[in-house]
Image (spheres, grey):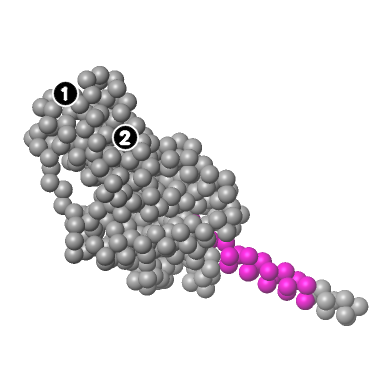
């Protein structure tokens, strides 16, 4: 009987130990929000609703615009955290994150994961404040963020410093698309096309044919990128495929850096299109622009844009392919994927639009510095190397949620 009693005590102690462990593992997010606040509604839609479905996280909603008690409590909380009382106001342990955007969303998710992994540094500060206990904030997470910032911050020429932890998918689309746009393979074609059109002294024809070239180029690039995304998504669960994309990105990055070093003291140009092919393209441009039939001229320019952009995909050394992998690894599909691809295309085409519209305004060929093309190899190489390494060794970072 004594043995049975002893085993029972041991069993009860074991249950207490297990319950204490599980309690430590559970992290609480306090979500102070206002009814009618658009940023609060967006956070609830994109983040809070998903967090509520998880068993390892507790979410406490506190509406403050119409609930006076909650409003007073938020004012009390903000004084402890020495912060403003703006909403949405998120509290996880000793960390308060005010406002909502892509950067703060990932910060909230990172803070949750940090406190889950570092239970000894987590405490429910809001409960302590409710109990009128004296609280001194010890934001270990923010200190951890500062330390890791040193490892994830890179300095890119022209652009300057940026931290990959704070990069959203939208920011990645803008940055990679912009770098991809400074591409010598398409720029020289556009400049020669503008030269040929200016020679016709027909502004309306110039606007029409130039616009057809730009719009067709953007459409072709978009269709190729979206097709890649659908293919990548179908095999995105394969670790091997992700590693292969990463190896490709590293190889492309090294090639871009090699191109920058090789051509830094001379005019940079497209390595894919040799002199013979250039002459063929120039002949076609002259033929299409001087075509009497406007319909045939338009069709010819469209065919030229399609062929040039297929070549340009080779010249860009895989930036759009890697961006498609970024979308896939973040599980972005459907309408959102279309919007991100369109954002990429917009900034990819930005330099072309600027050159073209200035040419329309001045009826002169815009001088385009080859330095930007050279730096595109340098910046593109750095980005490709960084993304390649992350795809292989730390894909969680590219998911922007740590």
* Residue plotted at (49% across, 57% down): 245
Image-based side of 180 in relation to 369, left or right: right
Q: CA distance from mark 2 to mark 1?
A: 20 Å
The label number, if any, that marks residue 304 in the structure image: 2
* Residue plotted at (38% across, 54% down): 317
Q: Is residue 206 above or below residue 13?
A: above
Image-based side of 176 in relation to 395, left or right: left
> Which badge, 2 or 1, comes first in the chain's sequence?
1
Provide the residue span drawn in magenta.
Answer: 10-31
Say if residue 151 shows up in the picture: yes
Image-based side of 289 in relation to 174, left or right: left
Residue assigned mark 1? 204
Q: Quadrant of the N terminus?
A: bottom right
Q: Residue furthest front?
A: 276
**Is label 2 or label 1 in front?**
2
Say if residue 354 shows up in the picture: no
Q: Is residue 334 above or below residue 48?
A: above
The picture places residue 345, in percent across and down from the top left corner, at 33, 41
Image-based side of 52 in relation to 265, left or right: right
Taking depth in this image into account, of 41 and 291 the one nearest to the observer is: 291
Q: How many marks?
A: 2
* SS for dot 1: helix
Dominant secondary structure of the magenta stretch? helix
Q: Is residue 20 magenta?
A: yes
* Residue plotted at (63% across, 65% down): 22
* Residue plotted at (48% across, 72% down): 121
Is the residue under label 1 in contact with that under label 2 (CB below 8 Å)? no
The picture places residue 135, in percent across and down from the top left corner, at 41, 69
Q: Is residue 398 above or below residue 189?
A: below
* SS for dot 2: helix
Mark 1 Cα shell of 10 Å, populated few (<14), some (14-19), many (≥20): few
């Amino acid at each position: 009987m004594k043995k049975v009693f002893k085993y029972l005590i041991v069993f009860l102690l074991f249950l207490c130990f297990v319950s204490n462990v599980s309690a430590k593992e559970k992290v609480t997010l306090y979500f102070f929000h206002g009814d009618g606040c658009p940023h609060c509604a967006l956070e609830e839609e994109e983040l809070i609703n998903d967090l509520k479905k998880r068993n390892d996280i507790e979410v406490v909603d506190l509406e403050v615009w119409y609930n006076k008690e909650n409003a007073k409590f938020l004012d009390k909380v903000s004084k402890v955290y020495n912060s403003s009382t703006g909403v949405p106001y998120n509290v996880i342990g000793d960390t308060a994150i005010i406002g909502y955007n892509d950067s703060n969303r990932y910060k909230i998710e990172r803070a949750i994961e940090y406190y889950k992994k570092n239970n000894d540094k987590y405490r429910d500060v809001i409960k302590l404040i409710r109990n009128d206990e004296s609280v001194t904030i010890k934001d270990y997470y923010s200190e951890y963020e500062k330390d890791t910032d040193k490892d994830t911050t890179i300095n890119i020429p022209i652009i300057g410093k940026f931290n990959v932890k704070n990069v959203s998918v939208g920011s990645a689309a803008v940055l990679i698309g912009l770098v991809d746009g400074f591409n010598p393979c398409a720029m020289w074609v556009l400049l020669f096309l503008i030269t040929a059109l200016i020679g016709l002294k027909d502004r309306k024809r110039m606007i029409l044919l130039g616009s057809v070239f730009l719009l067709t180029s953007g459409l072709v690039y978009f269709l190729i990128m979206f097709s890649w995304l659908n293919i990548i998504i179908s095999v995105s669960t394969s670790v091997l495929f992700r590693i292969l994309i990463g190896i490709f990105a590293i190889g492309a990055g090294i090639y871009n850096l090699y191109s920058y070093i090789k051509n830094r003291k001379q005019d940079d140009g497209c390595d894919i299109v040799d002199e013979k092919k250039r002459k063929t393209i120039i002949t076609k441009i002259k033929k299409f622009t001087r075509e009497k039939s406007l319909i045939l001229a338009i069709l010819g320019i469209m065919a030229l844009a399609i062929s040039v952009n297929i070549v340009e995909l080779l010249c860009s050394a895989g930036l759009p392919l890697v961006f498609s992998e970024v979308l896939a690894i973040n599980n972005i599909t459907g309408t959102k994927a279309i919007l991100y691809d369109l954002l990429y295309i917009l900034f990819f085409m930005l330099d072309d639009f600027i050159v073209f519209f200035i040419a329309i305004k001045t009826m002169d060929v815009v001088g385009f510095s080859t330095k930007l093309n050279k730096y595109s190899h340098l910046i593109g190489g750095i980005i490709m190397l960084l993304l390649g390494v992350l795809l292989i060794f730390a894909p969680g970072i590219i998911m922007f949620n740590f």
